[in-house]
Image (tube, helix red, strand yellow):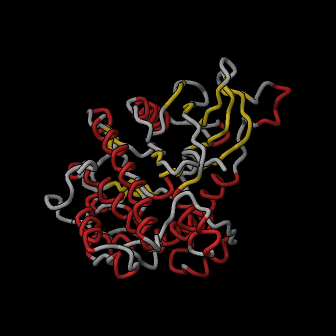
Amino acid sequence: MRVVPADDRNLTRTSLPMEMGVGVEPELLDFTDLFFEDSLEGRARPLADYLARFPRAEAAIAREWLRLMDVEEGTAVVTPKDEEDGKDRVGHYKLIEELGRGGQGEVWLAQDTRIARQAALKFMPQGFGLISEDKKGRFRREAEVIARLEHPGLCRIYDADVDADSPWIAMRLVEGEALSARIHRARDEDEDSRSKEVLPVKPVSKPELHRLLRFFERSARALHAAHEAGVIHRDIKPGNLMVTPEGEPVLLDFGMARGDDLGFQELTASGDIFGTPSYMAPEQVRGVAAEIDVRADVWALGVTLHEALTLERPFVGQGTADILSSVLTGKPSVPSEQNSVVTDELDVIVATALERDLDRRYPTAYE
């Protein structure tokens, strides 16, 4: 199974005021969160189901549902079926099969026609609608962010054409599966299936715990390398951590990343939220760009470690608004209370990564 930086559907980019709940319809946020959960788990609900569940925001939810369904079901201009017109290519890459799609575009398995190399090709087909200069600008900056990265634990870029009619980025094709898929499967697997897994989650023995911690130690080093290159990911989560067939981590999807130069700083204005609610640091929830630095990624990696240790997230709620409120003020669950293999020392490590006080949180992923 191949998993690549493909699916942006569970990302949230919502303009919110500084104080949660002011001028914002919680029902719309809750609907969006539920819609993405349904999509990721393969459920297809009709609009009527959502309207019945959120009766106070029917008009807004209907508009958002139609917009999201256009993204989910929209037909791309470029598909492998158009070979007679030469439309099975993007640049000098021949498209082989679609690997995923979301609001930011599509990702395809592609063959470089110049050399014998396959790649993950992310592009924005014109079938998604008129590509604005703002979208092209973000796509260009994503390519520039990825181009800074050189580390075996980071998904590197091969090539790009961000000024084409359908801008594209060719990236390393990563074999394996996302950590999120591993966690999801672990909730239902039996002991025989567990023994065959390359990476144990919710470990039941000290050797399994050590294997999992080795994975996260290497993930932290890769994340630190991105930070040293001046890049803050801003959307660390199990879905963006690949587990290779050898059990090594590769960090994916820098579409939400921010660089430390002025051009990247301008992408984020105060009052904007970028990220996935359950993994967002408090400073991201507050939407104050000046407060967001590498420690936001440290927080998200801590949340991800907690989930891998216990199969549960430290901050939960009935919908997006509840989750964000829990991130701001709730008490996180303690891993050792949910998994007896977890040591007191490991509880302290997770708790330090999840410190709301930035001065008490780990200052770097390396730490």
Q: Residue at x 56, y 64 (%)?
A: 36
Residue at image x 48%, y 72%? Answer: 30
Which residue is painted at 56% across and 68% down in the image?
61
| Number of numbered tags placed on the structure image | 0
Q: Position of residue 355 (x, y in %)?
A: 22, 65
Q: Is residue 14 above or below residue 265?
A: below
280 horizontally vs 172: left or right: left
Q: Does the image show residue 44? A: yes
- Side (left or right) of 68 relative to 348: right
In the displayed image of the protein, which residue is found farthest to the left? 359
Q: Position of residue 280 (x, y in %)?
A: 35, 61
Q: Position of residue 96 (x, y in %)?
A: 74, 36
Can residue 322 be seen at all in this image of the molecule? no
Residue 353 quadrant: bottom left
Q: In the orientation shown, which residue stands out farthest toward the right?
A: 84
- Answer above or below: position of 166 versus 321: above
Q: Position of residue 222 (x, y in %)?
A: 37, 43
Q: Residue 57 versus residue 290: which sits nearer the camera?
A: 290
User: Quick one: 128 or 327, which is closer to the camera?
Assistant: 327
Residue sitting at the far front: 207
Q: Is residue 304 left or right of residue 282?
A: right
Residue 110 horizontal side relative to residue 140, left or right: right
